[in-house]
Image (cartoon, helix red, strand yellow):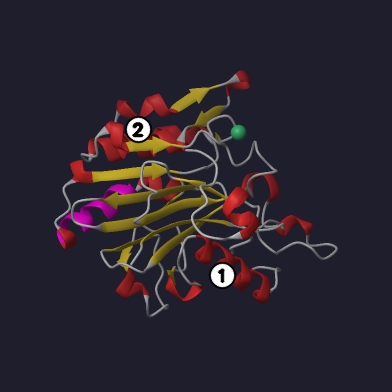
Amino acid sequence: MSGGVVITVGGCFAREGYIAADNIHCAEVAAVFTTRNGGVSGLLPGTGHYKSMNLQIGDSGDSYDNIKENYRIAASSLGFSADDVVSVRQKHTDIVLTADEAAGGAFEADALITDAKGILLSVRTADCVPVLMYDRVKGAVAAVHSGWRGTFTRIGVKTLERMISLYGTDPSDVSAAIGPAIGGCCYEIDTDFHERFREEYGGFIDDFFQTVNGGKQHCFLSSMNRAFLERAGIPCENITVSELCTMCNPGLFYSHRRSGFKRGTMAAFIGMRN
Ligand SMILES: [Zn+2]
């Protein structure tokens, strides 16, 4: 991962507003994770917690016009228009929809896939793990929202499985980028949480839990997502994991753990350009 790569004229968003998924992002494919910078939200008194690239959809105290403008800025910086963005109502499910299925807008899901060019898939996070995938042979992309529930139900793997069945994807042709999320440094969990994962997945899961001072347990969600994708056949050298923790970096990211609902929301975008 590295700082924003300038692709088209996008003002400050293209310079500092996103983190490119270096193993996917290229002339043909846009694949980025937004930061909280480069947008227009949070300029009025009392709204600073939205500053500035708030991409929340639905319940938000931020103005609709601000959010709409933020989507326009983000999409145009990536060579798309706001009308090209496909997103869904996220509910921590393990439901995977194609862009066509999601186009009706009435559905709840937490992963999107498409093999069509000119569509910019989007999922939103503010501590949860965003995962982008690209099948460079069949020409298909995926955007996944994987919080602890999504990780538990392996929504990333279910997304890959749907790409296999719909597009004929071979996992060894897939590159995956796991974006900024809450890190093991900050993600403190309840005691039964580790047990629940172990019952489902066995001792393999122990690598992603650590007991720290005071007997509290911390969980490394991003690494667990990577491990599930590797076990599903994506070569380890094709997977990148951002080391940036959303909770540790208030200047870069919104964080639900840090701020509760008084915050904005980042987005992960992926799309194949026409
Ligand atoms: Zn942290």
Foreground residue among 244 and 13: 13
Is residue 201 visible in the rendered image? The answer is no
Foreground residue among 245 and 43: 43
Q: Is mark 2 within 8 Å of ligand 1?
A: no
By secondary structure, the bulk of the magenta-drawn segment is best described as helix
Q: Secondary structure at mark 2?
A: helix
Confirm whether the magenta stretch covers residue 164.
yes
Q: Is residue 31 left or right of residue 248?
A: left
Q: Residues within 10 Å of mark 2 (few under 14, many from 20)?
A: some
Q: Which residue is mark 1?
A: 72
| Extreme-bottom residue of the structure | 104
Residue 153: horizontal and vertical position, in percent? 34, 48
Foreground residue among 155 and 22: 22
Name the residue at 22% across, 41% down.
Answer: 232
Is residue 33 visible in the rendered image? The answer is yes
Q: Which residue is mark 2?
A: 198
Residue 76 versus residue 212 in the image, above or below: below
Name the residue at 56% across, 70% down.
Answer: 72
Looking at the picture, which amino acid does disc 1 mark? Arg
Residue 249: horizontal and vertical position, in percent? 65, 39
Q: Residues within 10 Å of mark 1 (few under 14, many from 20)?
A: some
| Extreme-top residue of the structure | 213
What is the CA distance from the residue labelled 2 to the residue labelled 1?
43 Å
Looking at the picture, which amino acid does disc 2 mark? Arg
Q: Is residue 82 left or right of residue 42?
A: left
Confirm whether the magenta stretch covers residue 32.
no
Q: Secondary structure at mark 1?
A: helix
Residue 272: horizontal and vertical position, in percent? 34, 61
Q: Which residues are magenta?
A: 154-165
Residue 197: horizontal and vertical position, in percent? 37, 37
Q: Is residue 99 left or right of residue 1?
A: left
